[in-house]
Amino acid sequence: MASPKSYRAPVLADVAKAAEVSVPTVSRVLNGSKYVAPELAQRVTEAIQTLGYRPNGAARSMRSGRRTLVSVLAGATANYGYARTLQGVETAARRAGMTVSITVVESGDDEHVRAAIDLTLAQPTAGVIVLEFDRAGINAARALPEGLPVVVAGGGSRRTGHVPAALIDERTAGRQATEYLLHLGHKTVHHIAGPTEGKHSGRTEGWRAALAAAGVPVPQIMRAEWDASAGYRWGERIAGMSDVTAVFCANDDIALGLMRALSDRGLDVPGDISVVGFDDQPLVALWRPSLTTVDQDFEDLGARAFGLLAQVVDGEEGVASSVSTPQLVVRESTAPPKG
Amino acid sequence: MASPKSYRAPVLADVAKAAEVSVPTVSRVLNGSKYVAPELAQRVTEAIQTLGYRPNGAARSMRSGRRTLVSVLAGATANYGYARTLQGVETAARRAGMTVSITVVESGDDEHVRAAIDLTLAQPTAGVIVLEFDRAGINAARALPEGLPVVVAGGGSRRTGHVPAALIDERTAGRQATEYLLHLGHKTVHHIAGPTEGKHSGRTEGWRAALAAAGVPVPQIMRAEWDASAGYRWGERIAGMSDVTAVFCANDDIALGLMRALSDRGLDVPGDISVVGFDDQPLVALWRPSLTTVDQDFEDLGARAFGLLAQVVDGEEGVASSVSTPQLVVRESTAPPKG
DNA sequence: TCAGGTGGGGAAAACGTTATCAGCTGCCGT
DNA sequence: ACGGCAGCTGATAACGTTTTCCCCACCTGA
């Protein structure tokens, strides 16, 4: 009886010896090759059972070249959109017999980007999915080496780089949300944007396009971080601005912070001001008033990204990108303006 | 010039040839061994740069036996607690130079448990962290093979199995929340529990202990799924029960659903009924009324779990478990009963 | 001058698996 | 009777690293 310390996991050779066959035969049984006599297969299967043998993934993937790990690079993991996308990737990967690894890119700085990539590529990965939801993801996608299977997932309406992309058409969604508010009779729509640099946010582009198409004035963009407290601070200022009757927020957290601030200042939503969010987190339907927002199917986004990566890994040429359009969900936080 | 199709990732031998040194020397440089002349090291570093060489993780971990992948098994990923715990694990792992893989156990059924374990162990993993937040996780922890480094993370106040555990003392927290409501003057406290089987939930145990210690009647437990709609349905029933003045909910989602239902029925929180949640999701502080709840530091839980796993992987004997106590956060949803 | 370190570097083995190849049975068709 | 061809099996060679072993050159002290 071996002491626990001297325990060594059984390997193929141990199984072969126990079953009194050769090593390659065990391998054949494991990989379901035909050309192996039923009786031997039986012995091998039993030996595997009794020894509790598990194939060594490292050796396996080294020799065969087949990789069963798909890596996700993301600027965060716990935020709603990130977590749901990751869930979509994991589910799709699991159905395909693959496992998902996740590495966070702490910021868009070169140092963090490089560290994350080094860590990821130290694993025997089949390919990488980059979540291009923020600067960290965008930079990471750029910094990945050539020749490696890569796809990006993000919110653009068209692919930006030269790698396949799974996308959500935020531009169209932002436009629809803004048009809806205008349709209700608002003279214009204000907008709290996320920290995305420049004019690269599809949500903001859509908002601007809708205002331009309607020929109404385009208010100054208000910039905020993604979290609720930023929305709250803007709410405090907006409460003092008499010309604001409708606000389109870059995400739900900002919208909820805004609504709370307005409520704290004695303003009514939607009576005094209409508010629209973006994401459709589950809880926003419970809010009082429940939030009109844009439903993004992040899980589907993750699944599509995995599908594209699988194609690239299989060596297909010219893999097409994939775009979905999110839907406006009308609830209680929007109404025609007063008077 | 090789065609893109014939591209083969550079390996150690290529670097060695380019730098005009032997293969082991390159390896020594990579692993920072002393005993290598500065000049050679220089040549090797340059060759690595120009060739864009990346070590093959599979070969590396096969030969050295060192594993840099830590696997997480969980019943879900996107829910608040799961996502935050995962984040904690990832951050700690990344700081230690390791990568995290995640596999979802779809249910507690043998079939799903086995599939998830097979998938996980097909990777060259250093060890496994199991999130024991639900039946799927509990069963997965039981089904993992002996000899594999395993730790669990969960909400018990004491470890259940024979593997090290990172825990959050939900029992004490549940007791404190209930005591707080009693202290406010409520005659008793009702409880909406989660779907956890039997009496194994620490939150429920703590609630029962507090009531018993105070010598007040213990109401019938109300069972619910973890989501808000279950809380909403109980809210509809509670609105018709005149003896309910305080409700302790097993998580924040249930509490928010409950509050919305009460509000829809014209009842005031906390005027008519006090509500306490569990988890302290960021948004509940914004609610109107903001939710009194129990702050669970899931990120810390994940970090502690990783720390324990690192000890086990290093071969330390008798690794102690780790327990933290969550804090009650008093906000607007609780008040003394009427009259 | 020579024995005995010591810093430095290469040859070769090893890790656990899969792929390749060759060999051994029978059995078929001519 | 014999070539050929399935069906089956085991030696053996890879895969890309790290580790072990050994050798060489140099330096030191006697």
Image (cartoon, coloured by chain):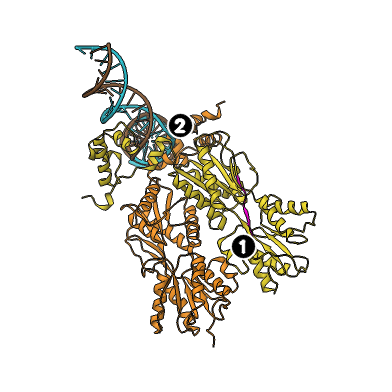
Chain colours: A orange, B yellow, C cyan, D brown
In this rendering, the label closer to the viewer, 2 or 1: 1
Residue in front for this viewpoint, A120 or B39:
B39
Please give the count of numbered marks on the rendered protein.
2
Q: Secondary structure at mark 2?
A: helix
Q: Is residue A320 above or below residue A147?
A: below
Name the quarter where the C terminus of chain B is drawn. Answer: bottom right
> For mark 2, does the 10 Å Cα neighbourhood hold few (<14), some (14 to 19), or many (20 or more) residues?
some
Label number found at residue B181: none
Residue B226 visible in the snapshot: no
Q: On the picture, is B48 further left or further right than A71?
A: left
Residue bearing the label numbered 1: B253
> x, y (%) of residue A321?
37, 64
Q: Is residue A87 above or below residue B72?
A: below
Q: Quadrant of residue A219?
A: bottom left
Residue in front for this viewpoint, B85 or B116:
B85
Q: On the picture, is B183 further left or further right than A268?
A: right
Give amino acid for label 2: Ala
Start-end of magenta stretch: B323-331
Question: Is B330 one of the magenta-colored residues?
Answer: yes
Q: Is residue A317 above or below residue B301?
A: below
Residue in front for this viewpoint, A218 or A90:
A218
Residue in front for this viewpoint, A73 or C20:
A73
Give amino acid for label 1: Asp
Q: Secondary structure at mark 1?
A: helix
> x, y (%) of residue A143?
33, 55
The CA span between labels 2 and 1 is: 53 Å
